[in-house]
Every structure is written in structure tokens, then in C-alpha cells.
Image: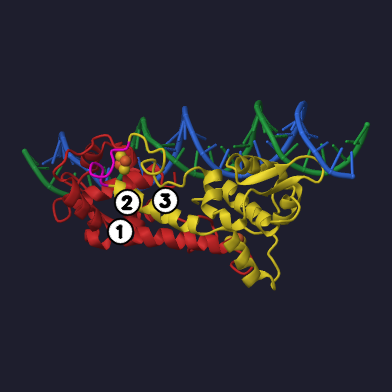
Chain colours: A red, B yellow, C blue, D green
Amino acid sequence: MIISTKGRYGLRAMFELAKAYGQDPLSIKQIAAMQNLSEQYLEQIFSKLKGAGLVRSTRGAGGGYTLAETPGGISVGQVLTALEGELVPADCVGDDAAGCAKAGLCTTHIIWQRIYDGFTGVVNAITLQDMVDDFHRLIADRPQAKNVKC
Amino acid sequence: MIISTKGRYGLRAMFELAKAYGQDPLSIKQIAAMQNLSEQYLEQIFSKLKGAGLVRSTRGAGGGYTLAETPGGISVGQVLTALEGELVPADCVGDDAAGCAKAGLCTTHIIWQRIYDGFTGVVNAITLQDMVDDFHRLIADRPQAKNVKC
DNA sequence: AATATATCATAGTAATTTTGTCAAGATTAT
DNA sequence: ATAATCTTGACAAAATTACTATGATATATT
Ligand code: FES
Ligand code: FES
């Protein structure tokens, strides 16, 4: 599996925040209950999301987390990268590609580059707003699954 | 890193086989020397490649491995899938997606599906022949790197 | 001031996966 | 025969994953 639980759970959590955008903050306890996740594991996830500047936190009673930008301003790629690190097929592509022999010397470089470009192209093109729109268009009238596997 | 050493080393090994297509088989010892890899680890890799039907083996002295098809008939995706398993972002897409709540019930399903489609679209479109062509076009005149990091 | 509600920070840990190594056997060309 | 080569299975160190646990700090409410 390419995306670990951190990325998958984190994306589900960010989806809840996107649905609640403009309203009061959501606490970890609320999100954990909504998405059936461990509270303490979610804390670790939100620590990374906050470090990446994707969420804002409010401490104390009635506090919680809100999106740092509009749902349309946050891409799935930003969320996954914050939680998984750079989504590279090999260390030879991406921002910190040190010591790579590069294209012209290493024949597989062009492969990793194309995979990376395709991947980032997809995940950067989808925003949290797109997820919310899909939700309203397709799902609102049906019962939602409680115990999802993703 | 999305692709582990098995997939990365295996692709480099298959690239050597593609360059030698139509000639005598290449032994593991030769491939290991050419790509600077461990012979015993390569044996495991070729065991999987053979199980997937991508290479043919010849035992005994002078034996080794050859591609089971033309370089143009084997895609990078086939090689990586044979070595890494299905390249799925989450268990909810791909051939053995059991117990998934599916789109319409789980909002993130469409995300995993799009990532999967994008990924497979890229890796299935590139064949070993493309790699060989790139090699001849771009690299043949330059010195090749000995110790690559991919 | 006291209390309940939250985030924040760090440490520990069991299970799994990765990344190999090692050794013994089977097959075939010469 | 013999050397070369694939084949198979066991083993293991290291890294990663997927959590759990604990305590500290900040804030709203009473
Ligand atoms: S060394 Fe960077 S792609 Fe091979
Ligand atoms: S349960 Fe399959 S995508 Fe969520």
C-alpha cells in the first residue's frame, strides 16, 4: 500500500474539517468519533498537519482544529505530503534528490520522474472542496458507511 | 519511497535483459556485476519475475535469464507489480479490493481510484523498449554512472 | 480560584516489512 | 565427471508502521 494509515486517516480527518469549514472548530475527540479513529493517533497526525500549516488550532474548552485556508485552497497532495513525506517512487526525484546520477547517466531516472510527475499531477489537482462537492452530489442521500477500510 | 529496492533493482535488471534481447541469456552473476547488486538478493527478485512469467530461465553452464517476450511487450508496470504487489494507494482499489464501502458510501474512494488510475496509466504506458530507446538516444555517448542510487 | 476541556510533546512498543545473507540441492553444457 | 547456473527455503538485522501511554500546557466556564 502506497499510502499508510497516517495519510489515509489524515485525509479523512481533513475531509471532516472541510465539511465544517466556516463553523466552530472540531476537536480531535469529535473527529475520532465521526471517522472511528484513535484519538491519540489522530493527535500525532494533527501535529504534522499543523507543522505543515494546513490547520489552525484553538486550545482549551470549546477548541479544536480548523482549516488554515479554504477547502479549495488545500489539495489532497498537500495533505498526503505533510503526512507521508514526499511521494517519490525513488529518492532520485523530488526536492531533496541528493547524489542522483540524473538522466543521461542513469537510465531509470526518466521512469521515476514520469511516475512522480503523474502522481503529483493527480493529487495536486484534487482539493478538499472537490471532495466536499462529491460528497454533496453523490452521497448525501445515502447512509454513510461506519467502519470504512481506508 | 513508494518503490522498494526489490522493484528498483528488478527494473534495472530487466533493463539489462532488454538490452541483451535476442542474444545469449544473462546470468545473475553478470547482471549483478553490471548493475552493482547483490547476487543472492537478485536471485529472490528473479524468482518473482519468473513466477510472473516475465522472464525465462536456462539452467546449467552458460545459462541465465532472458525476457519472456519482446522488450516492447513488457511494461514497467508489469515488472513493478510482479515485485511490489499491486501498486495501490489503499486496499480499496485494485483487483483484490475486498470489504470496501465503495464510492457513494465512502468519500475517499474516488481519491484512491484516481491515484490508482493515474499511476497505472503511467507505468503501463512505458515498456522496456522505451527504456532501451532512451538509452541509445541519450546515454550511449556519455560515461555511465557505476554506483547509482536507484 | 477551581474545574473541565482541549491541544501539545514525548516516549515506549508490538507487529510487520524491508533488505538482505546463507546454505543445500537440482539441472545442464562441456 | 565437473563446473556453471538456477532453485528453494530458512534465517536475521534494521527500519517502518501503527499504535498506546503519560504528562504538561493553555483556555473557557463555573
Ligand atoms: S541514480 Fe538517480 S535515477 Fe538512478
Ligand atoms: S472503505 Fe473503500 S474507499 Fe473507503
Residue B16: assigned label:
none
Chain to which the residue tagged by mark 3 belongs: A
Quadrant field for ligand 2: top left
Q: Secondary structure at mark 1?
A: loop
Image coordinates of residue A18 in percent, x first then y, are: 21, 53
Up the image or down, B126 lies above or below B7; here it is below
Dot 1 alpha-carbon crowd within 10 angstroms: few under 14, some 14 to 19, many 20 or more: some
> What kind of residue is marked 3?
Glu
Q: Is mark 3 within 8 Å of ligand 2?
A: no
Disc 3: which residue: A84
Which span is picked out in magenta? B100-107
Up the image or down, B92 lies above or below C26; here it is below
Image coordinates of residue B68 in percent, x first then y, are: 63, 48
Q: Is residue B101 magenta?
A: yes
The CA distance from mark 3 to mark 1 is 17 Å
Q: Secondary structure at mark 2?
A: helix
Chain to which the residue tagged by mark 1 belongs: A
Disc 1: which residue: A126
Dot 3 alpha-carbon crowd within 10 angstroms: few under 14, some 14 to 19, many 20 or more: some
Residue A99 visible to the viewer: no
Q: Dominant secondary structure of the magenta stretch?
A: loop
Figure label count: 3
Image coordinates of residue A100 in percent, x first then y, are: 59, 63
* Residue drawn at point x = 50 percent, y = 42 percent: B85
Mark 2–mark 1 CB contact (< 8 Å): yes
* Residue drawn at point x = 22 percent, y = 50 percent: A17
Chain to which the residue tagged by mark 2 belongs: B
The CA distance from mark 3 to mark 2 is 16 Å
